[in-house]
Amino acid sequence: MQIGLGTYLALASVLFTIGAIGFLTRRNVLLQLMSIEIMLNSVNLTLVAFNRWSPGAPGEWMLQGQVLAFFVIAVAAAEAAVGLAIIISLFRLKNTVESDRADLLRH
C-alpha cells in the first residue's frame, strides 16, 4: 500500500480540526496552547507533504517546504515561551489558568 499526498492532507486536516475544536471548547489556557501547537504541526505536515510531491527540475533546490516548516517550528517555540510567561503571570495574579478569568485588561 502506497501512501499518497491525499493521505497526508487528510491527516493534516484531521489534526487541524482536532486542534481548532480543542482551542474553541477548552477554558484552560494550557490546553488552548497545546491545541494551537497541534494546529501548527498540521500546517508543518502539509508543507512537507506538498514539498515531497511537488514537481521540480532535477538539481533544483527542493527544500522550500522543509525550510518553511523550520520557520513555523521556530515561531511555535517563541509562541510557547511567550504564552507560558503570560500563563504564569495570570496564575500569580488570579490563582487560576482559566481563560474566562483573564479579564485583567478590562476597566
Image (cartoon, grey):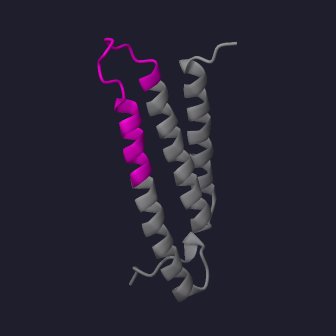
Where is residue 92, by image quadrant?
A: bottom right
Residue 103 coordinates in the image, percent (x, y): 47, 78
Q: Residue at x 57, y 33 (%)?
A: 13
Residue 21 coordinates in the image, percent (x, y): 61, 48
Q: Residue furthest bottom?
A: 93
Q: Residue at x 48, y 62 (%)?
A: 80
Give the tally of numbered discs: 0
Q: Is residue 76 left or right of residue 12?
A: left
12 magenta-colored: no
Q: Residue furthest front?
A: 59
Q: Which residues are magenta?
A: 51-74
Q: Residue at x 48, y 81 (%)?
A: 89
- Residue 62 or 3: which is nearer the viewer? 62
Residue 52 coordinates in the image, percent (x, y): 46, 22
67 magenta-colored: yes
Q: Is residue 107 left or right of residue 31?
A: left
Q: Point out the image quarter for the C terminus.
A: bottom left
- Residue 14 or 102: which is nearer the viewer? 14
Q: Point out the image quarter for the N terminus.
A: top right
Where is residue 51, by image quadrant?
A: top left
- Residue 16 or 80: which is nearer the viewer? 80
